[in-house]
Image (cartoon, rainbow, N blue to C red):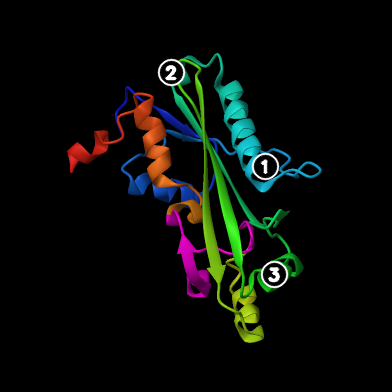
Amino acid sequence: MDPTQKLILASGSPRRVDLLMQAGIEPARLMPMDLDETPKKAEHPRSLARRLSTEKAHAANDAVKGDFYWDGSYILAADTVVAVGRRILPKAEFIEEAASCLHLLSGRGHWVFTGVCLITPDGAVRHKIVETKVRFKRLSTAEIEAYLASGEWRGKAGAYAVQGLAGCFVQKLVGSYTNVVGLPLFETTQLLAGEGFDVQAAWKEG
């Protein structure tokens, strides 16, 4: 990592860290922000993803404000929302929630929206919303029960992780795969590069 450019990731998601590392970007600090992620009344899934990613970025920025060491950092935040129509699916914490999500997703298409927010060292705020259409095969009772038993659904938007066992359920995907994992790499690296972050800095060390 170039010591002259620091990236703070306002998330504790191992998936987002892995995706950034895949692009050769190592976050200097992880700052998961504990915010209320409850959708507002009649809030559109796309709007929710934008709002939460923005709130997380500003919360992390406020938390390091005045700290000389982190002065001049890039702050990156993201939030992923899974929806069927306008119905926003939860980040499942209970098996009943997960079962409900899987039954709803079975045999139909759904949308995955990820809001990405970047606050630059000079305080500029940049946003991007990426959407991907995903269609699941029709799931049998046995498949749903086996997936629930795996525990992979816990804490995941829509109760599934596409990079894991649930990849077997995806019949069709239109758009960014990394968006469904939790961080659209193309759009994120373009945001960073557009604001002067050297995305390829670590590539030269290989």
Give me the C-alpha separation between circle 3 and circle 1: 20 Å
Q: Earlier in the sequence, mark 2 or mark 1?
A: 1
Is residue 174 covered in magenta? yes
In the rendered image, residue 144, in percent from the top left (x then y), is placed at: 64, 78
As measured in the structure, the alpha-carbon distance from the residue carrying label 2 to the one carrying label 1 is 28 Å
Question: Circle 3 is placed at which residue position?
Answer: 104
Mark 1 is on which residue type? Leu
Q: Residue at x 45, y 55 (%)?
A: 175
| Nearest to viewer (mark 3 / mark 2) | 3
* In the rendered image, the vertical position of residue 136 relative to residue 25, given as above or below: below
Q: Eyeballing the image, is 106 above or below 90?
A: below
Q: Residue 187: where, in percent of width, then height?
A: 42, 41
Q: Give left or right: position of 31 versus 145.
A: left
Q: Give yes or no for residue 181 being in the magenta stretch.
A: no
Identify the magenta region. Answer: 154-177
Foreground tag (2 vs 1): 1
Q: Which residue is mark 1?
A: 48
Residue 136 location (% of width, % of height) = 56, 71
Q: Position of residue 121 (x, y in %)?
A: 44, 19
